[in-house]
Amino acid sequence: GEGIDLTSNSDNNNFYNINSSSNTNFGFGMGIFIDSSTNNSFYNTTISSNDGWGVWFASATNNVFNNLEAYSNPSPEVYSEDWENSTGNILLYNDSFGQIRFRSLTLDIDGTLRYGPGTNISISNNSAYVNVNSDIEELNISANVTLRNLPTNFANPLIKKDGVTCNANECSNFTSLNAGNVTFNVSSWSNYSIAEDSLPNVTSVKLTTTNPATNDTTQNLTATVSASDADGDNITLA
């Protein structure tokens, strides 16, 4: 059977701290079934070890799961028989350090959804991380990220992806990066943070074409430069 069964316009409900596990029905048991229902919110839900699916959407719209954990269900952890009619359904992860709000789901999620330190979805101090190289590649989608309680005195802050500058095609901020609580959008997933733009490290400059017998200001000089940038930025010499 189903742990929670919302059918026929079961709308605008809030569910808190649900554990819907070990439901069986000859391979068709599921944690939560939402059929023709909308605007339901689930907070801190765990769904595991059912003999079928985790969450099943059927013509269900605009339902939000806050901090969903779904694992050890043999069928997809999140499933819809009709994604074209099950629109606006959201996964959102939130704690005191920040929030990840994925765009509306359009694909089944086959892999394990675990949330917290050491899992494949985590938020910590100045860090939002989703390991889509595990078994949740379906979540390698755009999301809005909020990081809370950050410094407000950066000289030149940047959004970093895996420690290097995230380019404008992948990251765009909605707030100032010095806002303290910073919100930005990402197009795909890895580890995101806010950090100071570091200056390039120039280790040597060596002139390679000069005429030491000539002392004028009209020579064209050629040099070799050894330099690196910790942010992964391009270095332009002029």
Image (cartoon, grey):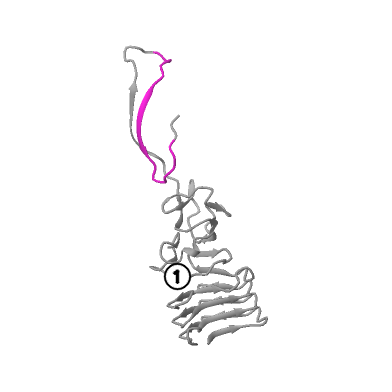
Which residues are drawn in magenta? 216-235
- Judged from this view, the residue extending furthest toward the right is 9
Residue bearing the label numbered 1? 111
Label the magenta part by its dominant secondary structure.
Answer: loop
Q: How crowded is mark 1: few (under 14 residues within 10 Å), some or many (20 or more)?
A: many
x%, y% of residue 97?
48, 65
Residue occupying image coordinates x 64% and y 72%: 61
Question: Between residues 107 and 175, which one lies in front from this camera angle?
Answer: 107
The x and y percentages for residue 53 are: 50, 78
Left or right of 140 on screen, residue 81: right
Image vertical order of residue 6 relative to residue 140, above or below: below
Q: Is residue 208 above or below residue 11?
A: above
Disc 1 residue type (three-letter): Gly
Tell me the residue at 54%/49% (across/down): 169
How far across and how far down the image is residue 31, in percent?
51, 81
The image position of residue 83, as x and y in percent, is: 60, 69
Which quadrant of the rendered structure holds the C terminus?
Answer: top left
Q: Nearer the viewer, residue 154 or 231?
A: 231
Is residue 94 placed above or below 184 in the rendered structure? below
In the structure shown, which secondary structural element does the residue marked by tag 1 occupy? loop
Q: Residue at x 56, y 84 (%)?
A: 4
- Determine which quarter of the picture holds residue 103: bottom right
Question: Does 10 appear above or below 193?
Answer: below
Residue 196 among magenta residues? no
